Image (cartoon, rainbow, N blue to C red):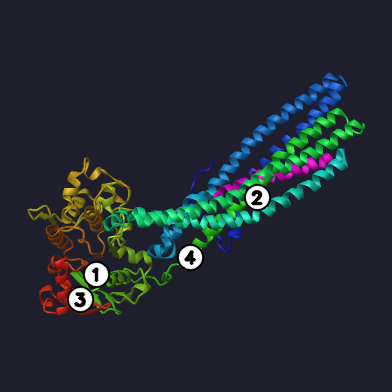
Amino acid sequence: MRRFPDPDPGNPDHRSPTSYLLWLAAYQRNALFAGALYGIVHVVAQALVPTAVGKAIDTGIIARDQRALLLWGGAVVVLGMVQATAGILRDRAALTTRLGASYRTAQHIARQAARLGAALPKRVAKGEIVNAGVVDIGRLGDALAETARGSGAIVAIAVVAAILLHTSWQLGLVVLLGVPLMVGVVSLLLRPLHRRQQRLREQQAELTGRAVDIVSGLRVLRGIGGEEVFADRYRADSQRVRAAGVAVARVEALLDGAKVLLPGLLTTVVVWLGAHYVATGRMGAGQLVAFYGYAVFLVDPLRRLTNAAGRLTQGHVAARRITAFLALRPEFAPSAVAPAPYQGPAPLTDPASGLTVAPGRFTAVACASPADAATLAARLGRYTDSAVTLGDTPLADLPPDEIRRRILVADNDDRLFAGPLREELRGRGSDAGSGGRANDAGRGRRGSDAEVGGRGRDVALDGRGCGVGLVGRGSDAALERAVDAACARDIVEALPDGLDDLVEESGRNFSGGQQQRLRLVRALMAEPEVLILIEPTSAVDAHTEARIAHGVGELRAGRTTLVFTTSPVVLDRADHVVYVQGAKAVAQGSHGDLLADVRYRSVVAREETE
């Protein structure tokens, strides 16, 4: 059995659902060919069994020829063994095809999600991604895997028709006319089934997205008393999905009935004609048994053929959704310009707002509107297109990987991943820093202990459990210092296994304030050249906030740190403060100096009052 997934999933052809299915088939051509071949051998061996049984009756039993009886009886045994062996190999090849198509598609969905990055939530609903990664990939695999049985069914029908034509052209003609008629009737049901499945798929994605939103925001909903409102909306949406599912089920029920009725009618006609020929002496008893066997046998390939048509219809619907996702493009294209050699820390400048972040300093930005903080952080981190420069180099001229290594943006929407807390907080290291989104910092390569040498230095505790000093990369000692700097020591000590305890999905075993401090630890461990924090202390009390401001300031001493906040405690700790109003930097200086500005003072006073 092949190992999945493949290291290189290739470049998908997502121009249309059909082209994507053909591309998958081309990549799985060896398994598809083997499955079709074994499927043909399986059904041909099965189709020849009635002939062998009829010969055994006519030349062995009726003619009382023991040798002929043993010969044709042995042929039946051999055909049964060939049929069983080919069936096993066919199913094995079909499984390889199904897994290959599913894994390959899952790889492309994951790569596209990573490629879209921060633009993903803006372009695609959460439920759409969940359905694509769980339901659609399975349907694509099933559609391709069904080709082994479908191709065998087509050959089986052709073989049986040829045998019947050779024996009796009238019976052969009945089969040749009956099968296309059945396919035509089934195709009339497949078209409405395709439309209704497409509608159901879209509504399922919307319902899944609503469920994800409700679960992720349940704590907020409870706080504002909005559970019943959203529960009513979910209930109404789920009823619409149920109605769409019932509409699909109606067509599927008709299709399933047709799978039984139409082959049964064809079998009845063939058996009736065969019995009539025996009664008139135009056919022997053994031939009648063979014809009855063919009539019964035809039910299976005809049913498989209609099943294959249904699976291909579902696969086409799934491919349509997946190709629509794969066709999405990032908000801006990555630069093809080779980055300039690294020259050390440099100022980060946003000409649109007039904000300049000096290298090696702790800068705080107080925004009159929270939306301005999110907008500026997105521009400075190159999550939206902008004219921001790092030194003399526009971020637009730097490859995304280079920007992510040097600039880290951490906000309160970042998630904690499930797994050991120690591994989650370690983050990753690189020569020029490890930036990107703070979510990214929790996964990937970590710096080794050897990388820490010469970069880290010991820290002292301020008597309240908060650390000061530089973080070394990846080591346990560095992690302990980051925990102390973020004042997360009490969280770790409260866990049964400390840093080796497990984080549940999305960190739900921690409170909002605890999650915020743990995310801060992870961001500190990434040790980027430029660290951008958005309201990193909004969920903690004033005393903890003061200790975090002191600890982070000391820990990041000598490196560029930018904090968007309206907290007077954090603003007072900053080396430089910028006041932003209307997405423009309108005043700057120290916290004490800016208090003379009534606009700045009103924002800070509002924070103190709250």
Residue 389 versus residue 161: which sits nearer the camera?
A: 161
Taking the magenta stretch, the answer to whether it contains residue 159 is: yes
From the viewer's side, name the closer residue of 297 and 427. Answer: 297
Secondary structure at badge 1 equals loop
Q: Earlier in the sequence, mark 2 or mark 4?
A: 2
Q: Is residue 532 magenta?
A: no
Closer to the camera in the image, 336 or 288: 288
Tell me the mark number nearer the camera, choosing from 4 and 1.
Answer: 4
Q: How far is the residue under mark 2 from the one under mark 3? A: 64 Å
Helix, strand or loop at mark 4: loop
Q: Compare marks 1 and 2 and give the one earlier in the sequence.
A: 2
| Image quadrant in which you'd find residue 364 | bottom left
Looking at the rendered structure, the secondary structure element under dot 2 is helix
Percent position (x, y) of residue 231?
38, 54
Q: Secondary structure at mark 3?
A: strand
Q: Quadrant of the N terminus?
A: top right
Quarter of the image containing the C terminus?
A: bottom left
Label of residue 425 in the image: none
The amino acid sitting under disc 1 is: Pro
Residue at the spot of label 2: 309
Q: Are marks 1 and 2 in contact (CB under 8 Å)?
A: no
Q: Position of residue 605 (x, y in %)?
A: 14, 71
Asked whether, in this view, residue 589 is left or right of residue 473, the answer is left
Disc on res. 328: 4
Please give the name of the residue rendered at 85% of the width and 28% of the height, measured from the top-left corner.
285
- What range of the chain is rendered magenta? 139-165
Q: Disc 3 designates what residue?
A: 579
Q: Amino acid at mark 3?
A: Tyr
Mark 2 closeness class: few <14, some 14–19, many ≥20 residues within 10 Å? many
Question: Three-letter amino acid code at disc 4?
Answer: Leu
Count neighbours of disc 4 (C-alpha within 10 A) and say few if under 14, some if 14 to 19, many if 20 or more: some
